[in-house]
């Protein structure tokens, strides 16, 4: 989702966020079929929390230029 800052316009943030959440959910479901791994609801909550934090930070990050963003890292 950090690629959103590569383009001038990223008006599809909601669609991208839902797709990332679905992808994360599918990965969690697939872990049920791998020996030694298990599907945890807490992991799905962690994925959703990460997406929500990203959405909350987008307005702030869009005001920064690339140099300021790199200084934050």
Image: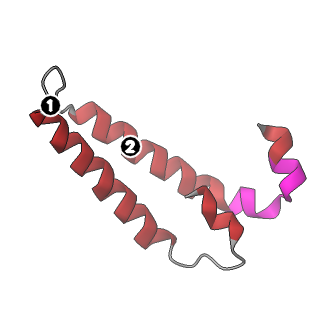
- From this view, report whether residue 9 is shown above or below residue 55: below
Residue lying at 70% horizontally and 67% vertically, measured from the top left: 6
Specify few, some or many for label 2: CA neighbours under 10 Å numbering under 14, 14-19, or 20 or more: some
Q: Give me the C-alpha separation between circle 1 and circle 2.
A: 20 Å
Side of 17 where 70 appears, left or right: right
Q: Which residues are magenta?
A: 59-69
Mark 1–mark 2 contact, CB under 8 Å? no
Side of 51 where 54 appears, left or right: right
Viewer-side residue, 71 vs 57: 71
Helix, strand, or loop for circle 2?
helix
Side of 4 where 28 appears, left or right: left
When asked about the image quadrant of residue 9, the answer is: bottom right
Q: Main secondary structure of the magenta part?
A: helix
Side of 67 where 29 appears, left or right: left
Query: The C terminus lies in which quarter of the figure?
Result: top right
Of all residues, the one furthest to the front in this rendering is: 35
Viewer-side residue, 6 vs 40: 6
Viewer-side residue, 43 vs 38: 38
Q: Nearer the viewer, mark 1 or mark 2?
A: 1
Residue 19 percent across, percent down from the top left: 36, 64
On residue 34, the disc is 1
Residue lying at 72% horizontally and 78% vertically, measured from the top left: 8
- From this view, report whether residue 5 is shown above or below residue 53: below
Residue 24 percent across, percent down from the top left: 32, 48
Q: Is residue 45 magenta?
A: no
When asked about the image quadrant of residue 61, the answer is: bottom right
Of all residues, the one furthest to the top in this rendering is: 36
Which residue matches tag 2? 47
Which mark is first along the chain, 2 or 1? 1
């Amino acid at each position: 989702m950090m690629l959103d800052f590569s383009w001038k316009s990223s008006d599809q943030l909601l669609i991208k966020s839902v797709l990332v959440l679905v992808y994360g959910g599918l990965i969690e479901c697939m872990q049920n079929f791998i020996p030694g791994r298990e599907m945890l609801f807490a992991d799905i909550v962690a994925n959703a929390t990460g997406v929500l934090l990203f959405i909350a930070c987008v307005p702030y990050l869009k005001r920064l230029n690339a140099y300021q963003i790199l200084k934050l890292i």
